[in-house]
Image: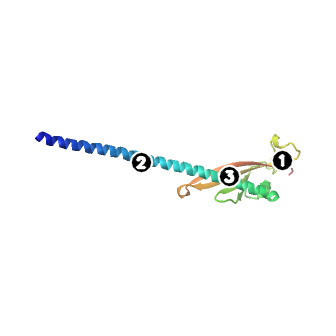
Amino acid sequence: MGNLNKQKGVVLVAAMLMILMVSGIAVSVMSGSALDSKMVNATQESYRTESIARGDTEKQIKEQLDNKGASKFLLKKSAYGSDTTITLSSTGSKIVMVNENTSPVTDLLECPPRFAPTPNIKCNYLKLTTSRKYGKGDKHTMTLNTGLEQEMMGGQ
């Protein structure tokens, strides 16, 4: 009879250890899936922000092209004044236009051969930098750079 009582206690302890081990495995698996979920959400938000920034850039390019003669793309570097950048308006994103012409003598540079079949055609090289904040507390910044070559009549 004494031997039977000892066996019941051993079975109880073994069962408790098994429950403890299974609970530990379950908690480990659950915390791993929560981390995976956070990583997927962060990646999705990054892709979504990139798509929005690209859309804002394309929208700004279209708006400037629709302005025809009043387009800021037609400004020579000398029209910028002391500031070397022009901030373009956009929804949610900050878009800055920089004139990339580095020549101290002229505002316009020679176009690549594929763009210069006509004499006196020069190029204005512009860079649009689009920045958009995202993430919890807007602590991350997505930045996209877009280059433009604008054909213009040559001259000083």
Task: Report how far apart the C-alphas of labels 1 and 2 lie in the structure.
Answer: 60 Å
Asked whether the residues under the numbered discs 1 and 2 touch, taking CB atoms below 8 Å apart as contact, a structural biologist would say no
Q: Tell me, yes or no, whether the two marked residues, 1 and 3, touch with CB atoms within 8 Å.
A: no
Near-viewer residue (155 or 49): 49
Examine the image and state in which quarter residue 6 appears. Answer: top left
- Residue type marked 1: Lys
CA–CA distance in space, label 1 to label 3: 23 Å
Residue bearing the label numbered 2: 31
Question: In screen coordinates, is 30 left or right of 54?
Answer: left
The circle on residue 122 is 1
Q: Residues within 10 Å of mark 1 (few under 14, many from 20)?
A: many
- Mark 1 / mark 2, whichever is N-terminal: 2
Which badge, 1 or 3, is on the more N-terminal residue? 1
Which element is circle 2 on? helix
Q: Of the residues shown, which amino acid type is indicated by label 3?
A: Thr
Whole-percent x and y of residue 57? 69, 53
Q: Quadrant of residue 18?
A: top left
Tag 1 secondary structure: strand
Dot 2: within a 10 Å radius of its alpha carbon, few (fewer than 14), some, or many (20 or more) residues?
Answer: few
Query: Could you tell which of marks 3 and 2 lies nearer the N-terminus?
Result: 2
Q: Position of residue 65 (x, y in %)?
A: 78, 55
Report the residue marked by disc 3: 129
Position of residue 41 measured from the top left corner of the image (x, y, whole percent): 52, 50
The colouring scheme, among rainbow, by chain, secondary structure or one colour, is rainbow
Task: From the image, state whether disc 1 or disc 2 is nearer to you.
Answer: 2
